[in-house]
């Protein structure tokens, strides 16, 4: 087994070893991976933060040593906390954009280390080794309001429902699995919607009873979720009610309190 790190803003991770295969998740800058078999120019990987297995193009990550991987895993990193920010190479002037939720590897006094080089970062960051107050989840979630929906997306420029929840909780020091069905197994299930607080999660199922959707509960019986775009809708015992189309779009399965 080998190890790697994301060195680009956001990279598609595929279900199979092909550019034509569906995107199942994304790797953000600074996130680490375990690297397994190679098939042509593709590697099968597992993302370190959520153990999600997928395929990634060999040109879209950097190899790191086991020691570097373990160092980065041992201490939760600082994370880029604004919509989009930049790092800059002080000698070449080269820049890389960082999206919300990107890791800042080896951050120290305004610099990060990547492949042995120092890059300057002067943006807004958050320390995810410390769990933030629950209200911070809402302010972070509202930053992504109107971000477009994208299957497998985890960025402000394209995000799916579980990717949205995962990134927002990551910014608040809580690690969640990648998919809605996996996230539903975390935390404490509530018996009634009236017991929920802002920042709790609501899960929704399909006709086969499979959990396929998740959103973050807001006050006044509302929910923020990614459906077409990150949007706010009404929530009740039946599910999500879309005022624009005057109909329910998702059927409520359970409410969960993560912390």
Image (spheres, rainbow, N blue to C red):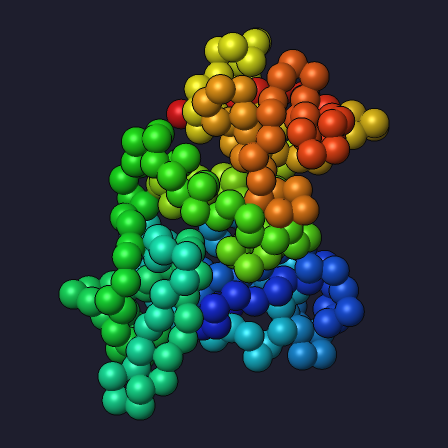
The residue lying at 45 percent from left, 72 percent from top is: 7
| Image label count | 0
The answer to which image quadrant residue 239 occupies is top right
Q: Answer left or right for 85 relative to 178.
A: left
Q: Is 254 drawn above or below residue 163 in the view shown?
A: above
Q: Can residue 61 be seen in this snapshot?
A: yes
Specify the quadrant that holds the C terminus.
top left
Asked whether 45 or 224 is in front, the reply is: 224
Q: Is 106 drawn above or below residue 142 in the view shown?
A: below
Specify the quadrant that holds the N terminus.
bottom right
The residue lying at 30 percent from left, 36 percent from top is: 132
Q: Among all residues in the image, which is located at the extreme bottom?
A: 92
Percent position (x, y) of residue 68? 35, 66
Q: Is 171 drawn above or below residue 32 in the view shown?
A: above
Percent position (x, y) of residue 143? 43, 47
The residue lying at 36 percent from left, 65 percent from top is: 85
Asked whether 143 or 131 is in front, the reply is: 143
Q: Among all residues in the image, which is located at the extreme left?
A: 109
Q: Answer left or right for 182 relative to 71.
A: right
Q: Among all residues in the image, which is located at the extreme right?
A: 207
Percent position (x, y) of residue 237? 65, 14
Percent position (x, y) of residue 18? 74, 71
Q: Can residue 115 be seen in this snapshot?
A: no
Q: Is 188 drawn above or below residue 31 in the view shown?
A: above
The residue lying at 63 percent from left, 62 percent from top is: 13
């Amino acid at each position: 087994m080998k190890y790697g790190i994301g060195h680009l803003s956001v990279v598609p991770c595929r279900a199979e070893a092909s550019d034509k295969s569906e995107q199942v998740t994304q790797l953000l800058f600074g996130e680490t991976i375990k690297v397994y078999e190679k098939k042509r120019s593709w590697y099968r990987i597992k993302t370190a933060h959520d153990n999600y297995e997928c395929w990634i193009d060999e040109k879209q990550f950097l190899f790191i040593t086991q020691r570097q991987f373990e160092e980065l895993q041992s201490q939760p990193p600082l994370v880029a906390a604004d919509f989009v920010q930049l790092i800059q190479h002080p000698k070449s002037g080269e820049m890389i954009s960082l999206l919300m939720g990107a890791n800042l590897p080896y951050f120290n006094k305004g610099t990060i280390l990547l492949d042995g080089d120092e890059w300057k970062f002067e943006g807004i960051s958050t320390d995810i080794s410390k769990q933030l107050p629950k209200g911070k989840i809402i302010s972070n979630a509202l930053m992504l309001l109107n971000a477009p929906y994208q299957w497998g997306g985890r960025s402000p420029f394209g995000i799916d429902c579980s990717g949205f929840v995962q990134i927002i909780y990551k910014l608040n020091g809580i690690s969640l699995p990648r998919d809605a069905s996996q996230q539903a197994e975390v935390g404490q299930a509530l018996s009634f919607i009236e017991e929920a607080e802002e920042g709790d999660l609501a899960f929704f199922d399909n006709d086969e009873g499979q959990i396929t959707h998740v959103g973050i509960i807001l006050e006044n019986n509302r929910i923020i979720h990614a459906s077409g775009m990150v949007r706010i809708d009404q929530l009740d015992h039946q599910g999500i009610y879309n005022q624009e189309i005057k109909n329910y779009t998702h059927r409520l399965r359970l409410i969960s309190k993560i912390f």
